Image (cartoon, grey):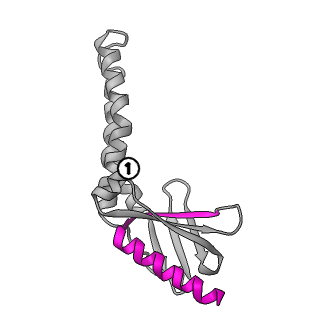
Amino acid sequence: MDEDEALTPLHPNYVKVVRLTSLLFAAPLVIAALILEATGVLPRGAFLVPVLLLAMWLVIRAPLRRYQARGYQLGDDRLRVVRGLVFNADTVVPFGRVQHIDVHQGPLERAYGLGTLVLHTAGNHNASVALPGVAHDDALAMREAIRAHVKRETM
């Protein structure tokens, strides 16, 4: 597997899941700003406008940037996961180090047919590597392919 090979992008529904998660995070901030301005504690627009602009950025632009900053490569003997906007991480997990493999699916991921593949490895630094935003069926297939490789190596 060559580091210069193109990364496989995450499923496009990942953007929708991140947007909904961001909306759930931003909504209480907007509600608090509305309450503070409605009670007259703050001057009109002094707090609400910046909070609304930040919330709009968090819900509209940030999820798209997160989606574009992530990707993966599934090789014959390793998985490469690339992520990060500010702090970039390029993690390669050799299948020989894999202890066990999980596929997680929260309610929003389930609604959009996504899952998170998690590889648990030996050691304590970066002992778990998560790959969110993969189609659930693809995550299950990747888990089985990695499991079969690990099983072959231990025999």
Taking depth in this image into account, of 43 and 127 the one nearest to the observer is 127
Indicate the amino acid at tag 1.
Ala
Whether 83 is drawn above or below 29: the answer is below
In the image, residue 123 sits, relative to residue 2, either above or below, namely: above
Residue extent of the magenta highlight? 127-155
Q: Is residue 148 magenta?
A: yes
Instruction: Tell me which corner region of the image, top left, top right, bottom left or bottom right, holds residue 7.
Output: bottom left
Q: Quadrant of the C terminus?
A: bottom right
Q: Which percent across, then down, holds residue 69?
A: 44, 62
- Image height check: is 67 above or below 146? above
Determine the residue positioned at 47% across, 82% down: 145
Q: Is residue 154 shown in magenta?
A: yes
> On the image, numbered disc 1 is attached to which residue?
62
Choose top left, top right, bottom left or bottom right for residue 110. bottom left
Q: Quadrant of residue 52?
A: top left
Where is residue 63? Give x, y as percent: 36, 52
Which type of secondary structure does the marked residue at label 1 adopt?
A: helix
| Residue 110 shown left or right of residue 74 in the figure | left
Residue nearer the viewer, 65 or 150:
150
Q: Dot 1, how many residues are within 10 Å of its Cα: few (below 14), some (14-19), or many (20+)? A: some
Which residue is drawn at the image coordinates 34% and 63% (left, top)? 114
Q: Is residue 16 above or below residue 3?
A: above
At 53% across and 84% down in the image, what residue appears?
2
Q: Percent x, y for residue 59?
A: 32, 44
Return the residue nearer the eye: 48 or 18. 18
The structure residue drawn at horizontal position 37% and vertical position 74%, both measured from the top left corner, is 138
Q: How many marks?
A: 1
What is the chief secondary structure element of the magenta stretch? Answer: helix
Across and down, in percent, residue 45 comes to 30, 20
